[in-house]
Amino acid sequence: MNTYNMVKQRFIKKWINTLHMLDSSIEHPLNVTERKNAIRLSSDLAIAATRSGSTVWSRALISRSGNKTTNKPMARRILKKARNRMKNRCNTLRRNGNFTAKSGTRKRTDLLKSLVPGGEVIDDKDYLIRETLDYIVYLRAQVDVMRTVAAIDLVTGNLTNDRRNK
Amino acid sequence: MLEGLVSQESLSLNSMDMSVLERLKWVQQQQQQLQQVVYQSSNNSHELLQILQFHGSNNDDLLQSSFSPFQMLGSGFGPNYNIGFGPPHEAISRTSSCHMEPVDTIEVLLKTGEENRAIALKNKRNPEVKTRGEEKTEKKIKVEAETESSMKGKSNMRNTEASSDTSKETSKKASEIQKLDYIHVRARRGQATDRHSLAERARREKISKKMKYLQDIVPGCNKVTGKAGMLDEIINYVQCLQRQVEFLSMKLAVLNPELELAVEDVSVKQFQAYFTNVVASKQSIMVDVPLFPLDQQGSLDLSAINPNQTTSIEAPSASWETQSQSLYNTSSLGFQY
């Protein structure tokens, strides 16, 4: 439990940083959809950066999110931070040519590959499952933190608004 | 759209509840089986019982035990088994010892601090069961005991399958398991021992082990057997989580007119206190918090949450205006327990 809490702690720190970076580079005013996209983007980048290591999904998520931001220099800045940490932990994908599957499993495996970021390049089923495991755990952490922040926001929303209006 | 999300989330949460209960029962069954094995075995049983007494309530959090499979891989359970146990270790060690190659990624996942890694390595090399008995209060030992019992339970099940092999085992297995470089598989009676089938069996066992870990993490996987069904569950769960992230980001966008998290006004201690309060009220953060009890405006209905939780939310809010610590100033309180 200690490590899970640490993961959440690191995630939220990174998330706030990323959100600030995004905030400074995007012009206001934003409507709800744009805000949602920005929050989602920063959250995905942050969770991938928290896991920055030898996982395929975190690297794929970062590159995928980097393409989404319209502001190229900022995207490069965010990607650089994560990439520097990942450079030392390069992990070559194992490619297993002997992968045979029955049709039902094949379809599902393909679907899983499409869900997990970076899963398309993984051929080895064993490795795919391991990546999925890892991804699920961090996704869970992301959901937990966002849920907590949303609950806190709901309570303090009125407080901060009053403070700003004063 | 939101109503659809609500029903889906509640369904998944219900399945989470069931799986927690089922897992509780499963671990209790494991303990009972383990105790039976212990009573039947020789005089080393009292050490096992000591370990068993450690993990009383190790099931209050789903993720804690879902991290235990990772820690199972990270802490060498192989050598820990075979030394310090007399005759029973031969029966238990009949299972194949797993190759430790996923240690890198999963250790990274688990232990970010250097000291944690040192502890993991130390525990890997320290096979003495008796020293573990001295470190009762450490959380890690609790998890290791739990993983050990779950491993023993699994091996116990295999014991009942072909118990005739027990008498023919040698203690060579002990020295084999200590070398963590290779996959050691002991052939069962009447099975082929040539290289290819051994390797194939090792690979199959690895995959099934992974499936087992996934069962621990993905709720509701216990009822489904077969790879296709479990893949279905996993896919469903990943989709669920991704949709939750989407929904939560929309909610945060609605709640924050500017692009910032109001959390930054919150002092660190209050934020951490919120986490610990939630956990201390026996309601794990992961499970069974009604996520979307929405009313028509789409705002979260806090009264539907456990009353403990609502008080914990309101108590910090009174002192937020008085304190002004920044969130970056993270002290070591709160998140560790």
Image (cartoon, coloured by chain):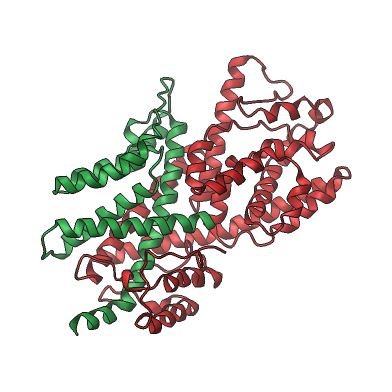
Chain colours: A green, B red
Q: Quadrant of the C terminus of chain B?
A: bottom right
User: Which residue is nearer to you in this view: B19 or B214?
Assistant: B214
Q: Position of residue B200 (x, y in %)?
A: 56, 22
Q: Is A63 rendered above or below residue B302?
A: above
Q: Residue at x 45, y 33 (%)?
A: A127
In this view, which residue lies farthest toward the right? B43
Q: Quadrant of the N terminus of chain B?
A: bottom left
User: Which residue is nearer to you in this view: A28 or B58?
Assistant: A28
User: Which residue is nearer to you in this view: B222 or B193?
Assistant: B193
How many marks on residues? 0
Asked whether the viewer can see residue B224, the reply is no
Q: Residue at x 41, y 50 (%)?
A: A138
Q: Position of residue B189 (x, y in %)?
A: 74, 23
A143 sits to left or right of B74: left
Q: Position of residue B336 (x, y in %)?
A: 54, 62
Q: Position of residue B319 (x, y in %)?
A: 40, 83
In this view, which residue lies farthest toward the top? B194
Asked whether the viewer can see residue A160, the reply is yes
Q: Residue at x 50, y 73 (%)?
A: B277
Q: Residue at x 60, y 55 (%)?
A: B23
The quarter of the picture where residue B61 lies is: bottom right
Q: Is A103 rendered above or below residue A131?
A: above
